[in-house]
Amino acid sequence: MNLGPLKAGYDVMLGNGQGANDVSDNNKRKCFIAALHCKPYEGLRLGLSYYNDEISADTMASHHGGTLNPYGLKVKQQLSSASVVYMGKHVEWISEATLAMNHTDSLGTSHTHAAYAYAGYRMHEKWVPYVRYDVLNYDKKELFYKKGNMKSFLVGLRHQINYQSVIKLEYEWDNATLTGKTHKVSAQFAVGF
């Protein structure tokens, strides 16, 4: 959707939340999602999104290895995100930041922050060297997520085979509270991106 001179658009959804499975939901409260974006000029997209849900005590938590909500507490969850994407002739930029606010009656509201930034420079038609930085910081009061603060820096080279497939070579340095400092080199064939 491209409304007005800013080429604005929106999405609004009401549906089953994290406690849902293929046939039912484990509570009557529905999650609410809203997103806004605009494209003020060619190649630039700015976005905001909001997610609100109530997570029952018996919800399966995939970030805890598919176990039940580990503390058996109802969690009121709000996620707020902002993003900036610019895809120019040579310069590529993608960044997003999210604030997760999880509220429980016992500890109040925790604030977890996550963000990443990607920058690439298209050389010729098919080659793009790029860098990416990721950061994840958990609140000490966080109960719902498995804690593990992390910072990561990545350097890569992407070769575009055609408009749908690429080959990537990457070096990544991570510093995470759960795994310590790690260095990794990887090669990948990917469809998209």
Image (cartoon, rainbow, N blue to C red):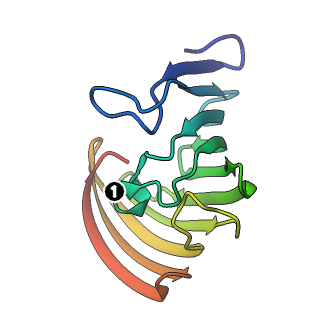
* Residue at horizontal 53 percent and vertical 20 percent from the top: 13
Q: In the shown orientation, is residue 39 left or right of residue 62?
A: right
Q: Quadrant of residue 42?
A: top right
Q: Depth check: give the residue in front, 159 or 110.
A: 110
Q: Quadrant of residue 172?
A: bottom left
Q: Is residue 92 above or below residue 182?
A: above
Secondary structure under tag 1 reads: loop
Q: Position of residue 108 (x, y in %)?
A: 76, 53
Q: Is residue 96 above or below residue 29?
A: below
Residue on which disc 1 sits: 66
Say few, some or many: other residues with alpha carbon within 10 Å of mark 1 (under 14 / 14 to 19 / 20 or more).
few
Quadrant in which the N terminus is drawn? top right
Q: Residue furthest right?
A: 108
Q: Quadrant of residue 22?
A: top left
* Residue at horizontal 49 percent and vertical 73 percent from the top: 154
Please tell me how many numbered marks the rendered image carries: 1
Q: In the shown orientation, is residue 81 left or right of residue 68?
A: right
Which amino acid type is marked by label 1? Gly
* Residue at horizontal 61 percent and vertical 52 percent from the top: 95
Q: Position of residue 145 (x, y in %)?
A: 54, 60
Q: Position of residue 116 (x, y in %)?
A: 59, 59
Q: In the shown orientation, is residue 29 left or right of residue 63?
A: right
